Amino acid sequence: METFRKLKSFYWPYKHMFLWSLFFSLFVTGIIVVYPIILQYTIDEVFIGGKHSAVPYLALGFVGIMIIKGIATFFQQYLGDMFGIKSVYHLRNTLYEKLQYLPFRYYDNAKTGDLMSRLTADVEGFRFFLSFGISEFIRLILLITVSLSVMFYYSIELAMITIAALPFLAIVVYKFDKQVHPAFRGIRKSFGRLNTKVQENISGINTVKSLSREGFEISKFNTTNDDYKDKYLHTANVWAKFFPLMEFIGNLCVVALLAYGGNLVINGELNPGELVAFFSLVWYIIWPIANLGFVINLFSQSKASGERLLEVLEAEEEIKNAETPITTAKLEGNIEFEQVTLEYSDEDTAAIKNISFHAEKGRVIGLIGSTGSGKTSVTQLLTRFYDPAAGFVKIDGRDVKDYALHTLRKNIGVVLQESFLFSSTIKANIAYGKPGATMDEIIDAAKRANAHEFIMDLPDGYDTLLGERGMGLSGGQKQRIAIARAICINPSILILDDATSAVDMETEFKIQHALQEVMKDRTTIIIAHRISSLKHADEILVLEEGRIVERGLHNELLKNNGMYKRIYDIQYKDQKRILATQIG
C-alpha cells in the first residue's frame, strides 16, 4: 500500500464521498443477504407450511426492497465516481504542473508519448480503482463475513464444509496477484512506448514521406504493437486460468454440500428451504472470493499506474528558486561567465569547459562554431535551463541562481532555431510572453521582426488562427513571429539562437536591419552559422568542443587565420560560386 500512502494527499480530502459511497454499498450488501432468508421463509413457511395468504405481502415487500436497493445503488455508484473523479482531477492538475517545472535534464531522457500515457491512461487506471475498487473490496469482505454468519445460523456442519474450501480459494487468489501485478506494469510500460511511437511518427510525417520510409515506420510500429499485444496476451492467459480454477473449487464445495446437506434434509435435521438458502449463500462466498481476483486485478493496474505517476511526481526539480530570491522587475543586462563548465549528465563529457566572458549592457556577443561545440549550452545556462557544474553565471553582478526564475526569464527574450507556435491566433502567439500586451505593442513587435506586412496579407490579419505547430505558415514566417514574440516582452537580454536560419538572405537582411534598433540598450547574444548574421557583433566567440578557441571582432578574427577565417572562406567561396552561377 506504499504507493497509495504516497498519493494519499490527492484522494483523502474527498474521503467523505468515499465513506458515503461505502455506507450505501454496505446497505446494498445487507439487502442482498436478505434474499436467501426470504427464499427460505417462502419455501418452508409459505409453500410447505401452507401460509399462502403471505404471498401478496412477500411480493410487495420484495418489490419495496428492490426499489430501496436501486436507490441505494445509485448513490453508491454516483458518490464513488465523484470520489474518483475529484481525486484524479487534483492529481492530473498536479502532474501537469509538475511537468511545467521539471528541468530540461528530465526531458532529455523522457519520451513525449510515454508522458502522455501517464497523464491519460495511468491517471484513469488509478481513478477507476478509487471509484470502484476500494469500496468493492470492502463490500466483498463484508458479504463473505455476513453470509458465513447466516450459514452458521442454519447449519454449523455445512458452514464448516464451506470454510474448508476457503484456504484453497485464498491460495489461488494469492498466486494470481503475484503474477498479475508485474504483468500489468509491463502493459503500462509497453503502452507508453506505443504512444511514443505514434507521437514521433505523426510529428515527423514530413520526413517519413519525403524519404519514402512508410514501410519502415509501419514495421517499427508493428514490432512495438506486437510487444503490447504479447504482454496483454500473457495477462489474459493469467486471467483465463484464474476463473475456471475458482469455479472448479467452488463446484467441488457445492457437491460436498449437496451430498451432506441432502442427507440432513432426509434425516429431518435441516429444512428444505434452509438448504436452498444455504446454496444461495455459498455462491455469495465463492463468487465474491473470485471477484476479489478482479479487485486485485484493478489494484494491480492502479498500483502499476500509481508507481508510474509517482515517478513523475517524485522527479527532482533541480532548478529551484533560492530561499529569498531577487524579484527585481527589470534587469540591466550585464552578463558575466566565470570559469563555467556544464555537464548534462555524469556520463557525458562536459558540453562547455572553463568558459569566461563579459558582456556589458547594450553589447552584442556573437557565438559561432561547429555543431555540438557548445553555443546553445551557453545560453541555456543564462536562462537557467541547466545549472553549471563549476563556475558562475552572473547578471548585473549577481549569480543567476539568486534571481527568481520568473524574474530571470521575463528579462530574457529567446528565439530558438526551431520556432514553436501554438494552435492559436497570431496575436495570441506574439503576446504569449506578455498576456496583457496592447495591440499597439503587438504590432510594433511584429514590425520590428519584419512580420507585419505578411501578417496583414493573411485573411484575418492578426486574428488568423494557426494550425498545430504553426501549420499554414512558411518556416521564415514562423521564425519572424517567434522573433516578434521575444521582442514583445521588451527583454533586457535578447538571445537569437540561429534565429534567421529559416529565412532567405533578403529576409535575413531585413530582419537584421530591424533588429539593429531592437538591440539598442539591451544585451544580445547571437548564435549563428552564417558569419553575415554576427560580423557586426561587439565581440565574437569561436567555440570548439566546448571551449573558446578564438575571440575578438570580425576583422581581427579574419587576420588570425584561425577557425573563424576558415568558416568565412568556406561561406564566402560558396556565395561567390552561387553568384557566378546566377550571372552565368
Image (tube, helix red, strand yellow):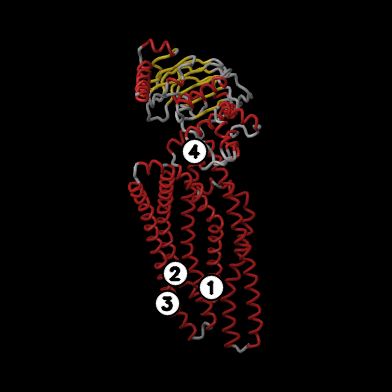
Distance from the alpha carbon under mark 1 to that under mark 2: 14 Å
User: Disc 3 to disc 4, how far (Cα)?
Assistant: 55 Å
Q: Report the residue marked by disc 3.
A: 255
Residue matched to label 4: 315
Instruction: State the image quarter where residue 491 is shown.
Output: top right
Q: Mark 1 or 2 closer to N-term?
A: 1
Is there a contact, CB below 8 Å, between mark 4 and mark 1?
Answer: no
The disc label shown at residue 152, or none:
1
Quarter holding residue 34: bottom right
Q: Position of residue 104 (x, y in %)?
A: 48, 33
**In the rendered structure, which amino acid carries the disc numbered 3?**
Val
Q: Is residue 249 visible?
A: yes
Q: Residues within 10 Å of mark 1 (few under 14, many from 20)?
A: some
Q: Which residue is mark 2?
A: 164
Q: Three-letter amino acid code at disc 4?
A: Ala
Q: Position of residue 464 (x, y in %)?
A: 58, 40
Q: How many marks?
A: 4
| Location of residue 272 in the rendering, given as x and y in whole percent from the top left corner | 52, 83
Q: Which mark is residue 504?
A: none
Secondary structure at numbered mark 1: helix
Furthest residue toward front: 584
Upstream in sequence: badge 3 or badge 4 = 3
Q: Earlier in the sequence, mark 3 or mark 1?
A: 1
Spatial CA distance of label 4 from label 1 is 53 Å
Give the number of the mark in front: 2 or 4: 4
Q: Is residue 486 above or below residue 547?
A: below
65 left or right, relative to 234? right
Q: Quadrant of the C terminus?
A: top left
Lower sequence index among marks 2 and 3: 2
Name the foreground residue: 423 vs 271. Answer: 423
Q: Badge 2 local density, few (<14 within 10 Å), some, or many (20+)?
A: few
- Between tags 3 and 4, which lies in front? 4
